[in-house]
Amino acid sequence: MTTSLFITVPPDGSPGMPVPAVTGVQMREIDRIAMNDFNLGILQMMENAGRSLAQIVMEVNVERSHVLVAAGSGGNGGGGLCAARHLHNHGQQVAILLTRPPGELTGAAASQLAVLQSAGVTVIPEEDISDALAQAGTIVDALIGYSLSGPPTGRTADLIGQINAAGCPVLSLDLPSGLDATTGSAPGVSIRARRTLTLALPKPGLTTPSAGQLFLADIGIPPEVYLRLGIRLPSFWGRYHILPLQRV
């Protein structure tokens, strides 16, 4: 069962439509079906997510101040790194914070980082993180996403605390790191976001105010994927790839 906790807010002023919310478990299955049964590549979905996230960041960072992208080692981090590339391509001053040394990244996140490093985008060394955060004008949170399992620990938990203390706008990818996608509870430290760009479908946990203003990004998943889980989507996208969301 899905629950309509959100409605779209089309920029052209047309009537909004209810959008079903999916739990973390459901979203994991949606991703699996999209990749395994529909041959939709993780890098394809990540590219759509990263481009959309970069657009949201540029709407906030109108003064073109320094952008820090805090990226974990999984798919959420890969989406953040992809956004960093798009920000770099559009002339934004961007640098990367990682939860692991660059050489320890694997899979899609490693692929995204390799492109950034070839383009000369800076990965901030651990000893310089405090200074980088102090100089940041906007921070992108791509640390965990919907895959949270227990309270954040180690360097991820430290970064969440430092990001919250930085005092500049924070934009989260999919949902603020440290929040449970299904319940919205925070078993440990969690990001306080000004905006959250959630992917494919919103998650019930985004009803919490700490997620800030909500946006939904189309990452290219066909509606037939959702039908495998009994989710029949209304045609709410129209001509947009990003839609503001309102909590019901």
Image (spheres, helix red, strand yellow):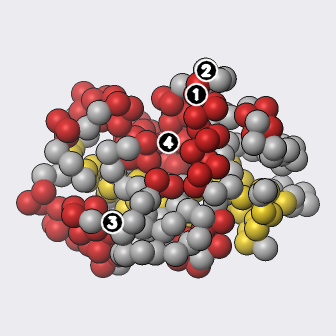
The residue beneath circle 1 is: 35
Which image quadrant is residue 101 in? top left
The residue beneath circle 4 is: 50
Q: Find out whether the residues at labels 4 and 3 contact each other: C-beta distance under 8 Å.
A: no
Residue at 73% over, 72% down: 247
Which image quadrant is residue 33 in? top right
Which amino acid type is marked by label 3? Pro
Whichever of labels 2 and 4 marks the residue nearer the N terminus, that label is 2
Q: Find out whether the residues at labels 1 and 3 contact each other: C-beta distance under 8 Å.
A: no
Point out residue 175 in the picture as x, y percentages from the top left corner.
Answer: 52, 61
The residue beneath circle 2 is: 39
Q: Secondary structure at mark 3?
A: loop
The residue beneath circle 3 is: 152
Point out residue 17 in the picture as x, y percentages from the top left corner.
Answer: 87, 58
Disc 2 to disc 4, C-alpha distance: 20 Å
Whichever of labels 3 and 2 marks the residue nearer the N terminus, that label is 2
Disc 4 to disc 3, C-alpha distance: 23 Å
Which amino acid type is marked by label 2? Asn
Q: Find out whether the residues at labels 4 and 1 contact each other: C-beta distance under 8 Å.
A: no
Mark 1: few/some/many CA within 10 Å (<14, 14-19, 20+) = some
Mark 4: few/some/many CA within 10 Å (<14, 14-19, 20+) = many
Disc 3 to disc 2, C-alpha distance: 32 Å
Q: Secondary structure at mark 1?
A: helix
In this view, the mark in front (4 or 3): 3
Residue occupying the far left of the picture: 127
Which amino acid type is marked by label 1? Met
Q: Is residue 135 visible from the viewing direction of this image?
A: no
Which amino acid type is marked by label 4? Gly
Q: Secondary structure at mark 2?
A: loop
